[in-house]
Image (cartoon, grey):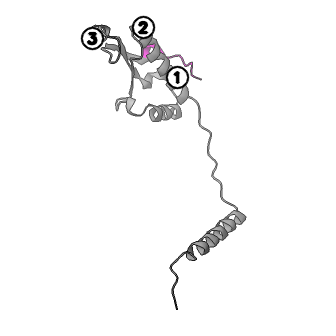
């Protein structure tokens, strides 16, 4: 579900910054990098999807519930703007994929016995490697 449509009212700010990297004089003169600031509360996500988005975003999520995405991969503003929106859409789409609920299982009695037997045999092998005492 990577084609999630971002509502326009969710985008708080779109700022253009001076990019870094290759580009010669163009990098120094033109602000081509895009910083997108999105209010995640306006995305209308379910609580579980919001928690997942918070985990996926990591340090890109602010304490105020805003998500910062910076795109500076391309040399034009339009390409970077599209890249930022595509990355935002993909991130929200990933957050909306519900994780399968984990079902806790117990090892069987036979599996526990096998494990203990393996440990005992391994311990006896290691015990045989010790220093030989001349008694």
Residue that appears at 48% across and 15% down: 7
Res 90 label: 1
Q: Which residues are magenta?
A: 1-9
Nearer the N terminus, badge 1 or badge 3? 3
Quadrant in which the N terminus appears: top right
Mark closer to the chain start, 2 or 1 = 2
* Left or right: where 87 falls relative to 126: left
Q: Which mark lies nearer to you, 2 or 1?
A: 2
- Circle number at residue 78: 2
CA neighbours of label 3 inside 10 A, class few (<14), some (14 to 19), many (20+):
few
Provide the secondary structure element on which disc 1 rests: helix
- 104 with respect to 135 (left or right): right
Residue 102 vertical placement versus 31 (above, below): below
Q: Which of 54/34 is in front?
A: 34
For residue 28, the mark is 3
| Alpha carbon separation for disc pair 2 and 1 | 18 Å
Q: Position of residue 14 (x, y in %)?
A: 36, 14
**Seen from this angle, which residue lies furthest left?**
28
- Labels 3 and 2: the sequence-earlier one: 3
Tally the marks: 3
Residue 115 falls left or right of residue 68? right
Circle 3: element type? helix
Residue most toward the right? 110
Q: Residue at 30% across / 14% down in the picture?
A: 18
Where does the image place residue 88, in percent across and percent down from the top left? 47, 21
Q: Are marks 1 and 3 in contact (CB under 8 Å)?
A: no
Q: Residues under labels 3 and 2: Cα distance?
A: 18 Å
């Amino acid at each position: 579900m990577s084609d999630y449509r971002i509502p326009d009212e969710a985008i708080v700010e779109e700022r253009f910054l001076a990019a870094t990297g290759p580009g010669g004089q163009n990098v120094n003169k033109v602000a081509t990098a895009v910083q997108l600031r999105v209010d995640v509360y306006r995305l209308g996500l379910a609580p579980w999807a919001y928690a997942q988005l918070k985990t996926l975003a990591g340090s890109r999520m602010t304490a105020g519930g805003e998500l910062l995405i910076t795109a500076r991969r391309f040399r034009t503003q339009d390409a970077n703007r599209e890249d930022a929106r595509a990355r935002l859409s993909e991130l929200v789409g990933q957050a909306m994929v519900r994780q399968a609920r984990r079902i806790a299982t117990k090892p069987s009695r036979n599996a526990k016995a096998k494990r203990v037997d393996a440990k005992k045999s391994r311990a006896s092998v290691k015990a045989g490697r010790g220093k030989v005492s001349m008694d």
